[in-house]
Image: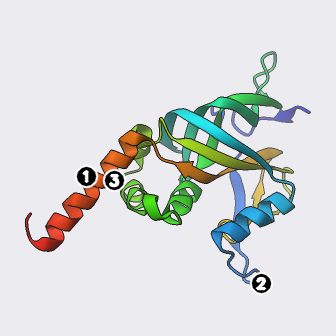
Amino acid sequence: MAQPKANAVEQVPAQVVNAVETASVNLLSFSEAVDATIADGGKVTKGIHITRATYSRREDGHEIVTLTGDIPVERYVADETNPDVFVKSMSKSFVVSLFSLVGMMSNMKDAQVLAGRISKRPMLIESLLPGSIITVVQRDVKGNVPFMNYFSNKENTIDHDSIVTDVVKLEVSDFARSMMDEYKKMLASALMGDL
């Protein structure tokens, strides 16, 4: 079903209209958040080989990463005949929140160092993620209807129907692994007073 575009120029996920802390919901562990999202209708796509990652900051301050992989996933894209309308389609490019991506990485033993670097220098994601393999969970959300983001413990409302995509598993590329190893060596040297 076609949806009016929130912004005719930008073809990224809908703008979050309202995000409020939900005090009545207990903070879930990462695995509990994944389970809750799947129980809430989330669809899992495994084994997506990332070929490109592009970081950007939207006008509203929300930081996003556009990922391109080898397996198409559902998303809303601009209609070819009416660019003012979004339609549900399959695409090899999709958008995730930088916040959720870094949060997921900080829960991985071998990617915690990488998460720390990316949170300080988000542009690093563009060189570190290509070659990696990911698993995503996607969930349809209705426009202007509050929904729970289990990964951030916040209730959100998006201004039109959308698909929320979260990366829930990451196998880092050889290049990213070598960069993590080099960074760990630098940290160890600094702690030993060698720098």
According to the picture, the residue beneath numbered tag 2 turns out to be: 24
Q: Please tell me how crowded label 2 is: few (under 14), some (14-19), or many (20+) other residues with Cα within 10 Å.
A: few
Please report contact status of discs 3 and 1: CB closer than 8 Å, yes or no. yes
Amino acid at pointer 3: Met
Is residue 8 visible to the viewer in this orientation of the structure? no
Q: Residue at x 20, y 66 (%)?
A: 188
Numbered circle sitting on residue 180 = 3
Asked if the residues shown at circle 3 and circle 2 are in contact, with their CB atoms under 8 angstroms apart, the answer is no
> Image point 84% across, 54% down: which residue?
144
Q: Residue furthest left?
A: 194
Quadrant for the N terminus in the image: top right
Q: Which mark is in front, 3 or 2?
A: 3
- Sooner in the amino-acid sequence: mark 2 or mark 1: 2
**Label 1: which residue?**
182
Locate the C terminus and report the quarter of the image it occupies: bottom left
Q: Secondary structure at mark 2?
A: loop
Q: Which mark is residue 28?
A: none
How many C-alpha atoms fall within 10 Å of the one at disc 3: few (<14), some, or many (≥20)?
A: many
The amino acid pointed to by label 1 is Glu
Name the residue located 42 percent from the left edge and 58 percent from the top edge.
119
Secondary structure state at the residue bearing disc 1: helix
Residue 187 spot, x, y in % from top left = 22, 64
Question: How many neighbours does mark 1 have within 10 angstroms: few (below 14), some (14-19), or many (20 or more)?
Answer: few
Tell me how far mark 2 sits from mark 1, CA to CA: 43 Å
Depth check: give the residue in front, 17 or 166. Answer: 166
Label 3, label 2: how far apart the Cα atoms are: 38 Å
Between circles 2 and 1, the one closer to the viewer is 1
The vertical placement of 63 against 128, above or below, is below
Q: Is residue 179 left or right of residue 14?
A: left
Q: Secondary structure at mark 3?
A: helix
